[in-house]
Amino acid sequence: MISLNDISKVFGGRTLFEKISASFNPGNRYGLTGPNGAGKSTLLKIVMGQEAPTTGFVSLPKRVGFLKQDIEAFKDYLVRDVVVMGNEALWAVMEERDKLYEQEMTDAVGMRLGEIEEVIADEDGYSADADAEILLSGMGIEEEFFEVKMSEIATDLQFRVLLCQALFGKPEALLLDEPTNHLDLTSIGWLEKFLLDYTGTLVVVSHDRHFLNAVTTHIADIDYDTLIIYPGNYDEMIVAKTSSRQSEEAENKSKEKKIAQLKEFVSKFGSGTRASQVQSRIKEINRLQPQEMKKTNIQRPFIRFKLPEKDAGKIAITTEDLEKSFEDNHVIKGFSKEILKGQKIGVIGNNGMGKTTLLKLLAKEFEPSSGTVSYGHNAVVGYFAQNHQEIVDKTRKINNFDWLKEKKAKAYDQEIRGVLGKMLFSGDDAFKEISKLSGGETARLILASLMLNEYNTLILDEPNNHLDLEAVSALGVGLSEFKGTAIVASHDRDLIDNFAEQIISIEDDGIHYFDGTLEQYLEKKAK
């Protein structure tokens, strides 16, 4: 069990949460939710002892698995060893054993080695390598990487290794902050199954709605400066939370109506002979005073994409024998396709298969090695890069408003302020320096530029990265209502399900096109 006792956290005068007391019980899987900036990651760090609370204390079980983010700290260790480090007690005695074997063998050393072997046996150390390899394989890491240094494998694979580390050694509790980042659909599916079989206490932060609905039994929601635990998955929490808020609002309105009637009586008979009745009603007025409702932290952007005045032709993009290679690595091979006006296409595939390369070719950000990409009549293409730095250069001294002004010089100031407001940059935030933007804010700024300009074809590469659940949901609505062509690569199944009517899947044997939704495609593939 994990217990929080009167936990508060204040940053520079701003209260993230106040006097939280809650228990997370074994066998339950909790999704920790709340908008960006609500304090989800901070609360996890407090639980792990990496950050001090302003008030209160935390009680933890003996062994806790925690998803670390500092890949640099493990760069010189072998991949398999990094996973085994997830069991700190086992790793410590294994290191001690190796050092003792380098010393002269004495009675004391021999006795200590005997003690160490007992600890290793108790910690299942003799199957540690095999257990680590099972986790690595489940995360889609090839066997050839098991005995190489972390620094020698791709960054996204390094994060997967750290996820394996958190899962290793049968922890009594698991704390996972955005575990689906850097995972493809196959690895996410494997992780979902692993967590469904997990019998300890799970607390997970994720912006992937489908993942939360699949694995959680409870939602711990940070809002109104506190934490409320709801039974059920994320969608069930939304229903319960909305219903509770509506009931509270209705109760307050009923009280206000009753108070108005009582005040009318007091005003009418206050100076008359019905003094006792007046005093009774004054007491009732005081008793009925509605409680002040705390303001929610949740904000949802409003995302809608406008079309140009000139109507586009029937075909948006045509590719003919499209190929792209990087030295000996042939990423895209012989892709020929007509993408029609108004089609909504989700692009899926495991990491490293070429989703980003394909989208860059379609957006004409890459030159093909051979073949052609051509745009249809009046096609106007807007592009969202997975690497935000390709679009927003944070080394520049420029603010949000001026950056958008550069993107559409003829736009009226009011138009720019309107788009910024819809993307939650209100007040002074409209003039916030781009160098100070968080990942989520940068993503919203890029989406604001796509809204400000008029495109009939959108090519978006992992636009949901760094967005909170409310923003991802709003993006799904914006794409589903967009009347133009949308081509979107994402590992977020809920986002793809919201808008995509066709699927492009990049697989080992080539690029496949499917006319139907993601769920229909996955059902067909499973059969």
Image: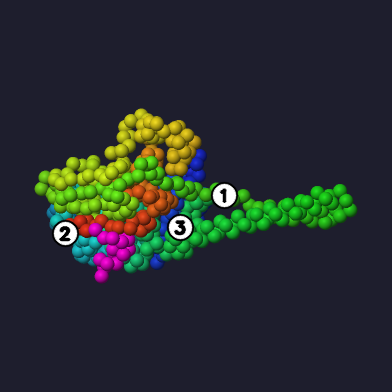
The residue beneath circle 1 is 294
Depth check: give the residue in front, 184 or 354.
354
Q: Is residue 378 visible?
A: yes
Quadrant of image for the C terminus: bottom left
Q: Is residue 504 above or below residue 520?
A: above
Q: Residues within 10 Å of mark 2 (few under 14, many from 20)?
A: few
Q: Amino acid at mark 2?
A: Asp
For disc 2, the marked residue is: 509
- Circle 3 sits in a helix, a strand or a loop, which is it? strand
Mark 2 secondary-structure assignment: loop
**What residue is shown with label 3?**
220
Q: Which residues are magenta?
A: 513-527
327 sits to left or right of 129: left
Up-down relation of residue 103 to residue 27 (above or below): above
Q: Position of residue 475 (x, y in %)?
A: 39, 50
Q: What's the residue type where badge 3 is placed? A: Ala
Residues at marks 3 and 2 touching, judged by CB atoms closer than 8 Å: no
* Residue type, label 1: Lys
